[in-house]
């Protein structure tokens, strides 16, 4: 009896697997795990080269990440799929036949960011896209320069203090509180 149950369980278990090839492509960036902010998502969409898809999933459902990335790549007909499951700390890159990727280089660049800031999933994926683009000999558009005010916040109190110290004292007027109106 237990043998029959094991055979039935083995035969039915593939039916329980999640079909990742059924995920609908949303563009170059597919944040199914909802871990990217709007700024990160916008930047990733601008810098992701053609033929590359960035995918985040909340769970791999015990599937190997390489198999999931290959299934998505095949279903979407992309050259390269970068797959990240942040909750499970798993990553994979799948490339079409003939496209050579150094997954270790991609992983090192992502790990460098995630080791210093574990919540910086978007920044790690940006590094992964840069790595793929460099390996494929493609140019990645430069990020627009933004001005960060935080390093200069100290100038406000310093300027106010300097103004207080440097201002000239005014002479007392006839309207002062020393003896009333017209007092001599």
Image: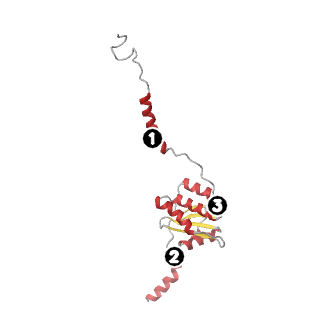
Asked if the residues shown at circle 3 and circle 2 are in contact, with their CB atoms under 8 angstroms apart, the answer is no
Number of the label disc, if any, that sits on residue 177: none
* Distance (Cα) linking label 1 and label 2: 58 Å
Residue drawn at x 43%, y 88% as measured from the top left: 2
Instruction: Between residue 165 and residue 107, name the one nearer to us.
Output: 165
* Distance (Cα) linking label 3 and label 1: 40 Å
Q: In this view, does 14 lie above or below 101?
A: below
Q: In this view, does 165 lie to the left or right of 122?
A: left
The residue wearing badge 1 is 154
The residue wearing badge 3 is 49
Residue 67 figure quarter = bottom right
- First reached walking from the N terminus: tag 3 or tag 2: 2
- First reached walking from the N terminus: tag 1 or tag 2: 2
Q: Is residue 108 left or right of residue 95?
A: left
Number of the label disc, if any, that sits on residue 16: 2
> How many labels, in total?
3
Kindly give the residue lying farthest to the front in the view shown.
166
Q: How is the image coloured?
A: secondary structure
Asked if the residues shown at circle 3 and circle 1 are in contact, with their CB atoms under 8 angstroms apart, the answer is no
Neighbours of disc 2 within 10 Å: few (<14), some (14-19), many (20+):
few
For discs 3 and 1, the disc positioned in front in the rendered view? 1
Across and down, in percent, residue 138 comes to: 66, 61
Instruction: Between residue 168 and residue 100, name the one nearer to us.
Output: 168
Q: Can residue 118 be seen in this view?
A: no
Q: Is residue 174 above or below residue 40?
A: above
* Distance (Cα) linking label 3 and label 2: 35 Å
């Amino acid at each position: 009896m237990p043998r029959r149950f094991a055979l039935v369980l083995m035969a039915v278990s593939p039916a329980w697997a999640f079909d990742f090839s059924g995920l609908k492509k949303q563009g170059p960036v597919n944040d199914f795990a909802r871990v990217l902010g709007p700024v990160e998502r916008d930047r990733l969409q601008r810098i992701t080269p053609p033929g590359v898809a960035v995918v985040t999933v909340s769970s791999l459902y015990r599937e190997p990440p390489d198999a999931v990335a290959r299934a998505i790549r095949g279903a979407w007909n992309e050259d390269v799929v970068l797959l990240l499951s942040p909750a499970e700390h798993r990553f994979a890159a799948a490339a079409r036949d003939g496209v050579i990727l150094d997954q270790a280089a991609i992983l090192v660049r992502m790990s460098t960011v995630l080791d210093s800031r574990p919540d910086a999933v978007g920044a790690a994926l940006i590094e992964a896209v840069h790595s793929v683009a460099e390996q494929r000999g493609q140019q990645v558009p430069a990020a627009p320069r933004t001005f960060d005010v935080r390093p200069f916040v100290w100038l406000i109190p310093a300027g106010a203090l300097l103004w207080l110290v440097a201002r000239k004292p005014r002479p007392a007027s006839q309207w002062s509180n020393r003896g009333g109106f017209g007092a001599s």
